[in-house]
Image (cartoon, helix red, strand yellow):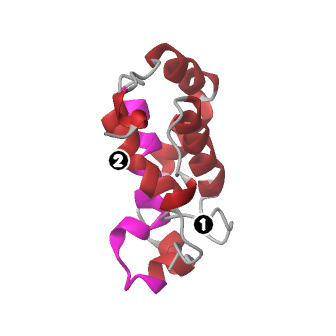
Amino acid sequence: MNPQEIKAVDRKKIKEMLNQKKDKMKRFLSHCAHCSLCADSCFLYTAHNKDPQYMPSYKVIHSLGKLYRKRGKVDRKFLMKIKGMVWRNCVLCGRCYCPIGIPIPRMIAFTRSICRSQEVYPELDEVSSESWL
């Protein structure tokens, strides 16, 4: 079993991080109109036959959104689940267009920092030279 899967998460640290940006991030999450314009501007979404898991809004709502809904009370299994969503399914290219002005890359980067604080991140052997395709 991978050591990342065994170690308990520091829920207090996660909650502190979430609280630092709570007002902004929750506002951004609540403003999403589910219009899918961000998806049309994402090359990963189009490269993966429009798989919904690659939609920028989907990635944010199912990672950072769930972290806020759960108030940071998550386990390592949850963080391992969203790891691929915020690293493999997004390259933070900044092309995802939101007509409302939601900063999707900033939100995914914030989710990555929360995962990193719990030592959840892709290992070098998990990343191939063409992992984004």
Residue 66, magenta (yes or no): yes
Estimate the spatial distance between the alpha carbons at disc 1 and disc 2, rounded to whole Å: 29 Å
**What is the three-letter code of the residue carrying label 2?**
Lys
Region rendered in magenta: 47-70
Q: Position of residue 31 (x, y in %)?
A: 50, 49
Q: Residues within 10 Å of mark 1 (few under 14, many from 20)?
A: few
Asked if one can make out residue 114 in the rendered structure from this viewpoint, the answer is yes
Which residue is labeled 1 in the image? 99
Which residue is labeled 2 in the image? 81
Q: Earlier in the sequence, mark 1 or mark 2?
A: 2
For the N terminus, give its image quadrant: top left
Judge whether 31 appears above or below 96 on screen. Answer: above
**What is the three-letter code of the residue carrying label 1?**
Pro
Q: Residue at x 53, y 51 (%)?
A: 123
**Horizontal relation, residue 43 to residue 103: left or right:** left
Q: Position of residue 113 (x, y in %)?
A: 61, 38
Q: Residue at x 54, y 71 (%)?
A: 128
Q: Secondary structure at mark 1?
A: loop
**Horizontal relation, residue 25 to residue 77: left or right:** right
Q: Main SS of the magenta segment?
A: helix
Q: Residue furthest top?
A: 12
Asked if one can make out residue 66 in the rendered structure from this viewpoint, the answer is no
Judge whether 90 appears above or below 6 on screen. Answer: below
Nearer the observer: mark 1 or 2; the answer is: 2
Q: Position of residue 109 (x, y in %)?
A: 63, 48
